Amino acid sequence: MPLFSLFISVVFLYVWFGDVRNAWRLKTSFWRSLPVMFALKALVLIIVSVIAVNFLFSSAILGRNETALLGFSTLLSAAISYTWYTYLRWIDAYEPERRKFLFLAFFLSCVSILLVFPITDYVHSFGFNLNGEPLNDFLYCFVGIGMVEEFVKLLPLLVILFFTDQINEPLDYIIYAAMSALGFAFIENIMYLNSTSLEALTGRLLYASVAHMFFASCIAYPLAVNKLKTGKKFSFLWLIVGFLIAALAHGFYDFWLINEKVNFPILTTIFFLGSLHIFTMMKNNLINSSDFFNDVFKINRNKLKYNLIWSILFVIYVGYFLFALLFGSASANALLLNAAIFHVSTVLYIVITFSSMNFIKGYKAPLRFPLKVFLPKLDAGNDFTNTKLSIKFIALKPFAKAIEIGDEAKGILTSRVVLEGDINWYFLFDEEQERAFLIKPKDLDAGFSKNEIAKITAVELVDTRNLSRLEYKKKDLLIAKHGVAKLIS
């Protein structure tokens, strides 16, 4: 795990330096740019927290005060829920949900969690319990944990679906399912934080709460896709399919942590990392399918990334501060060091993956478990739609400089398109020459400039009669050309 944390940290630094480089290229408000401001704020948070804890709380002030511990557990659980609530608000940008209905789903789940206990007792009445045998324990994790908890989390979503008119775009299914999951996790987190004297903070913030949102979304996503295909807001068949998938995923996640005979938590970790990719693709697909999708208004992925990591760090350091109040600076430092060694990779993995979304109207990526599961999702570049370019094509010869070949084009990158599964292409139509191209920047993060050329790859369309397509195959195109592009007014 320490090596994995080091690896993911290097990946994040690569991403951060790329963002800093782009901010420097813009030459405006560099010190107020998102990556620089995040680094400065994070540095201040860390330094101030460590100094305050080690100088003010060298010995425990409160000791193991049960009342204070319960209060701190509730406060930190609320902070965890609020962190993920704000994340959901950031991605629900095209048609934001009204807060009172989001909190209704959250509150209903806080209440419906009480059903877990009588349902679990009923399951136990049949003699169905964990007994250490792998097959029995797997079935119990699937039925006695997965089905029970996912059923309870499903109820608030159904209330919102049938008794309000708030679910009016595909993403809303996941938004309300995730809010229900956060309500469930809020109560559960209080109990775990209290019973572990706050030591479970990082695990509940990064793993449990996120996993609960993913499992609930496994039910919501099929309902949303069915709504897109049929226009019907509810399907009992797809509800059952999604429910079984969610319960199985939940059971699989828990089994490798619970059963002592085949205790193999690395499988839970691998599954969790893969689920982050799938969860991101679910959200991304439903955003792209929204009737409210707006090509002009763009969700700022960098803002999403740095706001999310700042929120996570803030909760962790508040927990560090409160833990020091209870148990002193030495214990708090040991807890923080342990979190840094074992959980920094998860923080960065989640942040990079959750912010790596591609906003392409109408495009739905296939949901696949990633082959490179130990690498966060890194397939998103900046969005250059509505950019007007002047292009000169060039020829590249081995061991020689690029030479101009006299062919030029100009136009606006009107939309993003997908070429053979590659999502980083743009459509450009040259009205004067009546020629259509697909354009891909060589550097997916750097922007275009009036003063500096940017390298691109361009392919011309064979047929210009149907120019409203979203996806293309190589047979639709002429030979690819290299080129350079400049921004024009």
Image: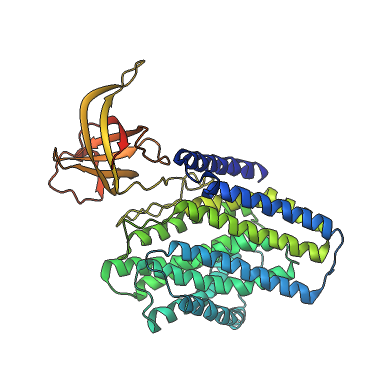
- Is 122 drawn above or below residue 304 in the view shown? below
Residue at the spot 57% in from the left edge and 64% down from the top edge:
83
- Is 221 drawn above or below residue 387 in the view shown? below
Q: Position of residue 204 (x, y in %)?
A: 63, 63
Q: Position of residue 460 (x, y in %)?
A: 21, 37
In the rendered view, does 380 fall on the left or right side of 307? left
In the rendered view, does 14 fall on the left or right side of 218? right
Q: Nearer the viewer, residue 247 or 353?
A: 353
Q: Position of residue 462 (x, y in %)?
A: 16, 38
Residue 130 can be seen, yes or no: no
Kindly give the residue lying farthest to the right in the view shown.
59
Q: Nearer the viewer, residue 182 or 14?
A: 14
| Number of numbered markers | 0
Residue at the spot 39% in from the left edge and 82% down from the top edge:
164
Residue 142 can be seen, yes or no: yes
Colour theme: rainbow
Q: Position of residue 135 (x, y in %)?
A: 58, 63
Q: Nearer the viewer, residue 114 or 249?
A: 114
Residue at the spot 50% in from the left edge and 71% down from the top edge:
179
Q: Nearer the viewer, residue 58 or 477?
A: 58
- Is 416 drawn above or below residue 170 in the view shown? above
Residue at the spot 56% in from the left edge and 60% down from the top edge:
253
Kindly give the residue lying farthest to the top in the view shown.
399
